[in-house]
Image (cartoon, rainbow, N blue to C red):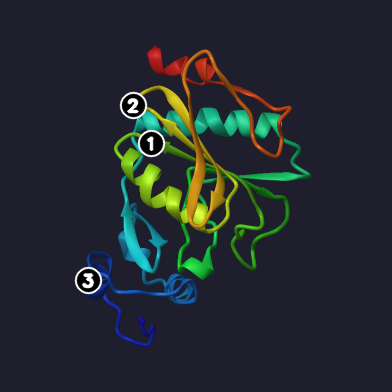
Amino acid sequence: SLKTSRNFDSTCLEFAMSTALQITVAEYDRLIKKGFFNQLRDRRIELIRGELRQMSPPGPVHEEAIDVLTRWSTSNTDPAVVRVRVQNSIGLPELDSAPQPDVAWVREQAYRKGRPTSDDVILVIEVSDSSLNYDRGTKAKLYAQAGIADYWVVNLRDSCIEIFRDPQDGEYQSHEVFDRGHTVRPLKFPKLKLSVTKLFDWYAV
């Protein structure tokens, strides 16, 4: 494991991000606290199964989709019950992971002492274009193994929403695709609905 007492300069950081050097969530948090990632500036990373992974910077289309989903999320949930987090991390210490989904609904409470864990997560949404295979594969397996019951992939390539549910033995047993003309509903809030057609209205302009 990585020892935070090392002189962890930019060369070490690049090495850690390009090799299979394994660190825990606790070690990752110590590095954050010590400012080891400050030199990355606008580069975003997340911890996935003990590895530091660089995230692709979101383009205007990706950001617009996140904005639309955020507005829908905040407009349709009770802030006393659901906290909507945008590109903030969730903690999966048992999997040495701290992913940063594009949108996450979590149980409302303060998280200044620690990230939301899988027990706090209500819904995870990833917006995908170039990351589609990664979000369908690596991320889906990670979230399934963590027991996250409701995982959506907003597929910008095909203008659809892919919904993964029923996690068992590290895999989602249900994977459904909803394209234009369909409506999707969060698992824990079935009275709420999102029109796939309306979600992608802006995309055709």
**From the viewer's perspective, is residue 191 above or below residue 109?**
above
Q: CA distance from mark 1 to mark 2?
A: 8 Å
Residue 38 falls in which quadrant of the image?
bottom left
Towards the viewer: 81 or 42: 81
Q: Is residue 92 above or below residue 64?
A: below
Q: Amino acid at mark 2?
A: Arg
Could you tell me residue 127's position as x and y percent? 43, 36
Question: Residue 171: x and y, percent?
Answer: 47, 51
Q: Is residue 18 left or right of residue 179?
A: left
Q: Is residue 18 visible?
A: yes
Q: Nearer the viewer, mark 3 or mark 1?
A: 1
Which of the two marks, 3 or 2, is nearer to us in this view? 2
Q: Secondary structure at mark 1?
A: strand
Is there CB contact under 8 Å for labels 1 and 2? yes
Q: Residue at x 44, y 48 (%)?
A: 140
* Amino acid at the residue labelled 1: Ser
The residue where tag 2 is placed is 157
